[in-house]
Image: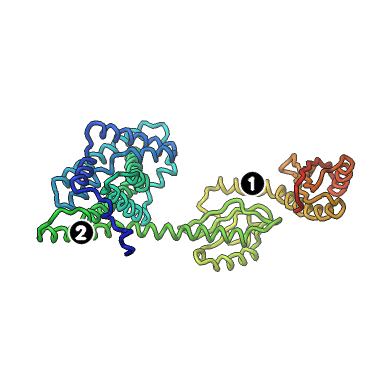
Amino acid sequence: MKINKYFDIHFERADDATIAKRLIGGAKIKGPALVILILSIFIASIGLNMNSTAVIIGAMLISPLMGPILATGFGFATLNFTVVKSGILRLSLQITIAVLASALYFYISPINTATSELLARTEPSIYDVLIAIFGGLAGIIGQTRKTLDNVIPGVAIATALMPPLCTAGYGLANGDWHYFFGAAYLFFINTFFIFFATFIVLKGVYSLPFHKQDKELIRRNQLIFLVIGLIMAIPSIYAGYDMTIKYSESNHLEQFIKNDVNQAGRRQVIDYSLDRTNKLVDIVAIGAPVTSEEQSQLEGKLQQYKYLHSYTLQFVNSVDEKNSTMDKTSLNKSSENLETYKKLSNLYQPTYQLVSETINTMKTTEAEAKALFPFVSKVEGMPLIDNLEQPKASRYMVIIHTTSTVSDADLERIKAWLEAKLSAPVTISVEQTTSTQ
């Protein structure tokens, strides 16, 4: 048996009349279809406004935007330009209604903060092109089957036609053209490549006989669509490349922070960021300050990371500020934020030092406790601190893990031993385990 039989899209294909009826009928926007369109617009707008993914998905499922796109692709594939004209006009009307209605919603909405769901629709990349192509192929193949399944709802969710239009409405309502044009570009990418996938599949599946000149016209249309598609994809290719670079930079920075900057018991990074414009790595750490000599060593290690070799390190809490290469004006942070970072560093550094010392002390305590008290399998503990500005361990909370039940006498013995070792009162909690650790 030939393997291509498993991939034959003619298998269980509906007849031509059924396909035509489905695709042309799906482009209707009168009556209930128009009402559903308006409802899906407001549902998507509310979802974007409230940053609710579930609500946005619901709007995608009920949106009728897919119909005119598939009908237009059908018209071009079969050279039925009456259907093409009707599909384009109906899609244009839907786009106009969607943008204006969503703009009205965002104009009167008391919440005008740009959410992450809105931002996600303003920076399309080559991955969105691929999703639209694969989604369009799946959608039209599903529409040409004898029995309809759940392909179209899945395609509607994957390609996301309604949310970009509502995001464009947000940009229009707030005068933010970055949001408007970014979202509009994403919508037209999805629309065009769904249409193109429809055209390609129907050209091979639909069995309407053509004259020789008709076949030449189809080939010419196919070439035109291919050129337009490549032109439309160019910005998304650049965006995809830029997104990949940003991801790689962030990934390498996380590795650099984890492997080279953080030092157990000595220093902990609490914030960091990349200033891609000025090629700076801004780091805020608590614990031991970074000297000029140590910063030079870290600069050398930074150069070993492929995507960070062009960046320069800058620490907010450098103790050797006179000799430090840190240029505070280039941190792209306000002076108020810088002061906040310094206050946090000064406030939490003593506490961090105390906690680090306690961790090391507990490691030694655990080893001694196992030798003195055979029933002990693990010891964990932390100081109870009353004043962050002048932290001092006024009492310790200690958890004793045991392999058997502990008698009151043994509990008193180990508590007295811990208080003598830690030179402070101790509150003990006992947890019995089934095996030693």
Q: Name the residue nearer the viewer: 146 or 273.
A: 146
Q: Marks 2 and 1: which is nearer the front?
A: 2
Q: Name the residue nearer the viewer: 26 or 258.
A: 26
Residue at image position (21%, 44%) is 18
Instruction: Kindly state the secondary structure of the residue where label 2 is placed.
Output: helix
Please rate how many residues cluster around mark 1, counting C-alpha atoms within 10 Å: few if below 14, some from 14 to 19, many from 20.
some
Describe residue 176's horizontal placement relative to residue 371 as left or right: left
Whole-percent x, y for residue 409 in the image = 89, 41
Q: Name the residue nearer the viewer: 87 or 151.
A: 151
Tag 1: amino acid? Leu
Please rate how many residues cluster around mark 2, counting C-alpha atoms within 10 Å: few if below 14, some from 14 to 19, many from 20.
some
Whole-percent x, y for residue 66 in the image = 28, 44
Specify the quadrant of the image occupied by residue 323: bottom right
Q: Disc 2 marks which residue?
A: 222
Q: CA distance from mark 2 to mark 1?
A: 62 Å
Tag 2: amino acid? Gln
Instruction: Kindly state the secondary structure of the residue where label 1 is placed.
Output: helix
Describe residue 431's horizontal placement relative to residue 269 as left or right: right
Q: Which mark is residue 203?
A: none
Query: Is residue 197 visible to the viewer in this orientation of the structure?
Result: yes
Q: Give the mark, 2 or 1, whose residue is nearer the N terminus.
A: 2
Whole-percent x, y for residue 74 in the image = 20, 49
Specify the quadrant of the image occupied by residue 385: top right
Name the quadrant of the N terminus.
Answer: bottom left
Residue at image position (14%, 52%) is 79
Q: Name the residue nearer the viewer: 352 or 70.
A: 70
Q: Disc 1 marks which residue?
A: 344
Whole-percent x, y for residue 437 in the image = 75, 53
